[in-house]
Image (cartoon, rainbow, N blue to C red):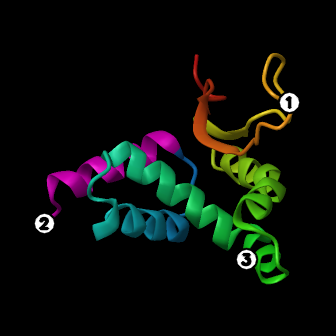
Amino acid sequence: MATERQKAIARHLTLLIPRVPFLDAEAIRADAGSRHMRSLTPAAAVWLATLAHIRHQHTDYDELRDDGYERDEARFFVLDAVNAVLDDWASTRQLVSEPDEVEGEDEDAETELDDTPALRQRPDAD
C-alpha cells in the first residue's frame, strides 16, 4: 500500500513528464522518494530527481566530469541534451541557464546554472 507521499510523487511525475518511459519513471520515482528528498515538497523532489536521472543516464555528464570538467561546466554543456529529453517526454518544464552578462551588473559577476524551471504550455493542451 502506497503512502500519501508516494501517491503525491506519482501524481507529480505524471503531471511533469507524462510520456516518460516506464523504466525511467520507476527510477525517478524511487529517487524522489528517497530519504534525502523528504524535506522537499513532492513536486520539488520529482523535478530534482528527474534532472539528476536525465543528467546521469541520458547525457555525457559523467564522461565530462571524468575528463576533468567542474560540475557547473559539465552541467552547462549538457543543458541542451537535458532539455531535449524533457521535450521527448512532453515535460511541462525546461531547465534554463542565466545569460553570460546582464546589463547593469558588474562584469566580474559570476553566472551559474539556474535549476529554476521555466513553465511552458504542454503541446497537447488546448
Q: Which residue is mark 1?
A: 101
Q: Pointer 3: residues within 10 angstroms few (<14), some, or many (20+)?
A: some
Tag 1 or tag 2, which sits nearer the N-term?
2
Residue 3, x across and y down, in percent: 15, 59
Q: Pointer 2: residues within 10 angstroms few (<14), some, or many (20+)?
A: few
Residue located at (43% from left, 52% from top): 46
Q: Which residue is mark 3?
A: 62
Residue located at (38% from left, 69% from top): 30
**Would residue 44 be found to the left or right of residue 60 on screen?**
left
The Cα–Cα distance between marks 2 and 3, rounded to whole angstroms, is 36 Å
Front label number (2 vs 1) = 1
Given the image, on which type of amino acid does mark 1 rest?
Glu
Residue 36 higher or lower than 6, as above or below = below
Tag 1 or tag 3, which sits nearer the N-term?
3
For the residue labelled by badge 3, is the local secondary structure a helix, a strand or a loop? helix
Quarter that holds the C terminus: top right
Q: Is residue 2 magenta?
A: yes
Given the image, on which type of amino acid does mark 3 rest?
Asp
Tag 3 or tag 2, which sits nearer the N-term?
2
Q: Is residue 65 magenta?
A: no
Residue 53, x across and y down, in percent: 57, 66
Residue 26 higher or lower than 3, as above or below = below
Q: Which residues are magenta?
A: 1-16
Foreground of the two, 15 or 42: 42
Given the image, on which type of amino acid does mark 2 rest?
Met
Front label number (3 vs 1) = 1
Quarter occupied by residue 111 = top right
